[in-house]
Image: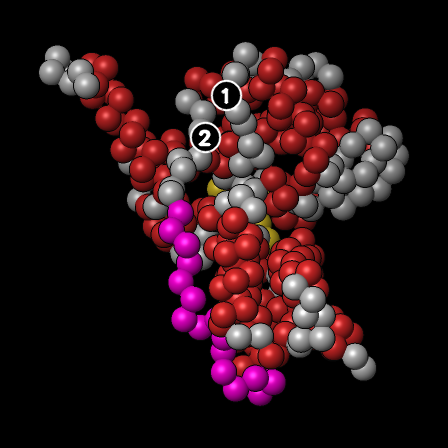
C-alpha cells in the first residue's frame, strides 16, 4: 500500500471511529473528512505526496494553516479545521500510530464574535403569518415555522422530525440533535394548534394515500429537505416585508434572544438549544444586552448616545 492509500485509509478509520464513539451525523463526518483531505491536497501541492499524515510536523501544520489564512480563509473556518486536525492526531496518538502529537501546542486564531442576525418579535409574527393557511402547503409551512420558532430547532432537526417524535398530548417534541443527543422541547399552544391543523387537514392531502413516517412532507409524499425549507423561509420573509439578511438559523436565534429578553435563565436556553457548551449560548446574552442598550438610548431622557 502506497502513502496516498495509507492516508486515505487512516481518514476512513478516523471517521469510522467518530461515528462509533459520538454517533456524528453523515454531514458532520463528511465535513471532518473534507478538512483533512485539504491537508492531504496541500501536501501534494508542496510536492510532498510521499509524506504520510503520521510524519507531519508542527511546522507543516503551521505552514498549512498560514497558507489557508493567506488565501482569505475566515478565522472561524480555520478554527474549525484546526479542531478537526487536533482531534485526528489525538486519535492517532491514542491508537499508538504516532508518539508525538504535532497539533497539541497550536493555538486557535483569534476570531471576532459577530452577533447572529435575529428578528424582532413583530417581525417573527409577520413571518409566521405569511403563509396562506387556506392551502395545504401554506398550512404545512405555517406549522413548520411555528414549530421552528417555538422549539428553537436547527432546520435539519425540523425537517428530520418523525411523527413518533411529537407527543401532542404532552405538548413536547423529542429532538435528536448533534451527536444523537436527545432533548425534550415544549412546543407551546400556538405551535400545537397549527401542528394539529396540519396533521388533520393538510398532511393527508399532501400524502394522497401514501405512507410516510416523516412529520413534514412535500406534495410528492417525500420528506422536506433543508434546502427546500430554506427557500420557503426566504419566500415567506419577502412576503412579510422582512429585509434583513436571513440565515437558516434566524428563527433559532430569535427563539433564544426572545427567551432571554423575557427573563429566561441562560442554562435553560442552553438545554433547549441542545448546546453542549454554555459558551456557545452566551452569544445570545450579547444580543439581549445590545437590545437593552438600544431601548435605554431610545427611551431614557439621558440615554442618547
According to the image, label 2 marks what residue?
117
- At 78% from the left and 74% from the top, the residue drawn is 5
Give the label on residue 244, or none. Answer: 1
Q: Quadrant of residue 276?
A: bottom left
Q: Is residue 78 above or below residue 119?
A: below
Residue 274: x percent and y percent?
48, 51
- At 61% from the left and 13% from the top, the residue drawn is 239
Q: Is residue 10 above or below residue 130?
A: below
Q: Residue 44 magenta-drawn?
A: no
Q: Quadrant of the C terminus?
A: top left
Front residue (pair 257, 138): 257
Residue 153: x percent and y percent?
54, 41
Q: Does the residue at mark 1 contact the one at mark 2 (Cβ under 8 Å)?
A: yes
Q: Which residues are magenta?
A: 94-111
- At 65% from the left and 31% from the top, the residue drawn is 230
Determine crowd level at label 2: few under 14, some 14-19, many 20+ residues with C-alpha closer than 10 A. Answer: some
Q: Secondary structure at mark 2?
A: loop
Amino acid at each position: 500500500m502506497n502513502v496516498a492509500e495509507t492516508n486515505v485509509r487512516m481518514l476512513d478509520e478516523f471517521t469510522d471511529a467518530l461515528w462509533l464513539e459520538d454517533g456524528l451525523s453523515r454531514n458532520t463526518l463528511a465535513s471532518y473528512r473534507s478538512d483533512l483531505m485539504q491537508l492531504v491536497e496541500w501536501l501534494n501541492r508542496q510536492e510532498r505526496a510521499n509524506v504520510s499524515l503520521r510524519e507531519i510536523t508542527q511546522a507543516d501544520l503551521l505552514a498549512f494553516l498560514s497558507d489557508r489564512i493567506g488565501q482569505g480563509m475566515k478565522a472561524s473556518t480555520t478554527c474549525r479545521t484546526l479542531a478537526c486536525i487536533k482531534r485526528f492526531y489525538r486519535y492517532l496518538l491514542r491508537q499508538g500510530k504516532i508518539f508525538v502529537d504535532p497539533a497539541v501546542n497550536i493555538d486557535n486564531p483569534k476570531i471576532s464574535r459577530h452577533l447572529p442576525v435575529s428578528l424582532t418579535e413583530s417581525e417573527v409574527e409577520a413571518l409566521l403569518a405569511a403563509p396562506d393557511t387556506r392551502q395545504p402547503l401554506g398550512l404545512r409551512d405555517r406549522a413548520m415555522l411555528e414549530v421552528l420558532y417555538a422549539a428553537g430547532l436547527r432546520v435539519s432537526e425540523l425537517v428530520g422530525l418523525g411523527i413518533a417524535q411529537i407527543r401532542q398530548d404532552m405538548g413536547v417534541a423529542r429532538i435528536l440533535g448533534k451527536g444523537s443527543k436527545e432533548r425534550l422541547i415544549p412546543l407551546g399552544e400556538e405551535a400545537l394548534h397549527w401542528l394539529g391543523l396540519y396533521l388533520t387537514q393538510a398532511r393527508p392531502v399532501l400524502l394522497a394515500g401514501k405512507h410516510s413516517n416523516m412529520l413534514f412532507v412535500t406534495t410528492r409524499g417525500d420528506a422536506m429537505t433543508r434546502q427546500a425549507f430554506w427557500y420557503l423561509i426566504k419566500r415567506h420573509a419577502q412576503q412579510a416585508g422582512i429585509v434583513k439578511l436571513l440565515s437558516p438559523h434566524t428563527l433559532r436565534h430569535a427563539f433564544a434572544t426572545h427567551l432571554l429578553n423575557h427573563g429566561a435563565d441562560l442554562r435553560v436556553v442552553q438545554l433547549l438549544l441542545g448546546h453542549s457548551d454554555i459558551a456557545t449560548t452566551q452569544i445570545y446574552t450579547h444580543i439581549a444586552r445590545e437590545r437593552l442598550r438600544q431601548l435605554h438610548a431610545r427611551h431614557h431622557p439621558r440615554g442618547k448616545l
